[in-house]
Amino acid sequence: MTAFGRRLVAGINVGIGTHLVVTTASIHYGTGYWGGQSSLFHQEYSDHSLVSEAPDARHYQAVTRLVTDMYTGRGLSSTTTRLSVPAIGVSDSVSFQDPAAICVGKEEVTEAFRAVATLNPQWITPPRCIHVEPMGSTIALTYYLNNRYGGRFSLQSLLVVHVELQQLPHAREFNQFVVTRMEEYWNGVSPISNLLFWAVRRINGVASFQITSRFLPSRG
């Protein structure tokens, strides 16, 4: 092997090693166990039975069904075709992020939740909409999630779902929710936001899409 070849291999190894270290750090930080960042979250949600829904949650049951499907292994696409009042849809440019990955576009997000389905997700307590916040043209819905994965690993998190109201053709009023963005905060902790960690999480999202779409069999 030439000197250039050796330098190239060494550079690739350093790049892969750095990527793995940053991904591991992002996941560990995101779990909230560094510096006790999740302690207040667990204190607030220590008794699952006391986690109450927001007063306006009943107006967003279609979104709640979407979240429930996503986090019980049914995936993203199954809900978007279901008839409901109001209707529920997902934007083609929808994004999803958590401490491990950032997925952009409906195809990437759909594949991400196909991958989640392989972990056999089951809720310990049903997803609950605990906060509703109008934000101009969008509404941010915060869900409390308490799930078990792989039959033994449990995780509490907050999922913020941003939706827009749209009017269907020939309708007289706004009657469709369209999901535009989703952010999951494991144990209530915001992911590290600097450029390096963002880039690594984005690469993970693209890699996850490529692997899942090519190698994970469709349920048909």
Image: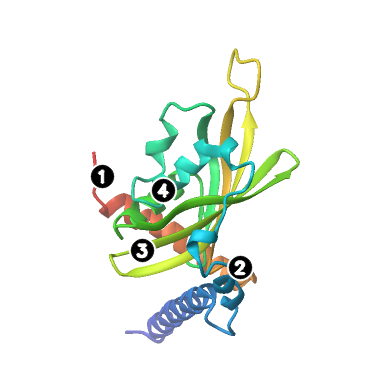
Residue type beneath disc 1: Ser
**Are there few (<14), some (14-19), or many (20+) residues within 10 Å of tag 1?**
few
Residue assigned mark 4: 70
Between the C-alphas of marks 4 and 2, the distance is 21 Å
- Whether label 4 touches label 1, CB < 8 Å: no
Residue type beneath disc 4: Met
Image location of residue 82, percent across then percent down: 41, 30
Between the C-alphas of marks 2 and 3, the distance is 21 Å
Between the C-alphas of marks 3 and 1, the distance is 23 Å
Inspect this view and state whether residue 14 appears.
Answer: yes
**Quadrant of res 208:** bottom left
Of circles 4 and 3, which is in front? 3
Residue type beneath disc 3: Arg
The mark that comes first in sequence, 4 or 2, is 4
Image location of residue 113, percent across then percent down: 39, 51
Of circles 3 and 1, which is in front? 3
| Secondary element type, mark 3 | strand
Inspect this view and state whether residue 101 appears.
Answer: no
Q: Which mark is residue 148?
A: 3
**Are there few (<14), some (14-19), or many (20+) residues within 10 Å of tag 2?**
some
| Secondary element type, mark 1 | loop
Between the C-alphas of marks 4 and 1, the distance is 16 Å
Residue nearer the viewer, 55 or 84: 55
Eyeballing the image, is 55 above or below 193? above
Between the C-alphas of marks 2 and 1, the distance is 32 Å
Q: Which mark is residue 190?
A: 2
- Whether label 3 touches label 1, CB < 8 Å: no
Residue located 65% across and 15% down the image: 172
The mark that comes first in sequence, 4 or 3, is 4
Residue assigned mark 1: 218
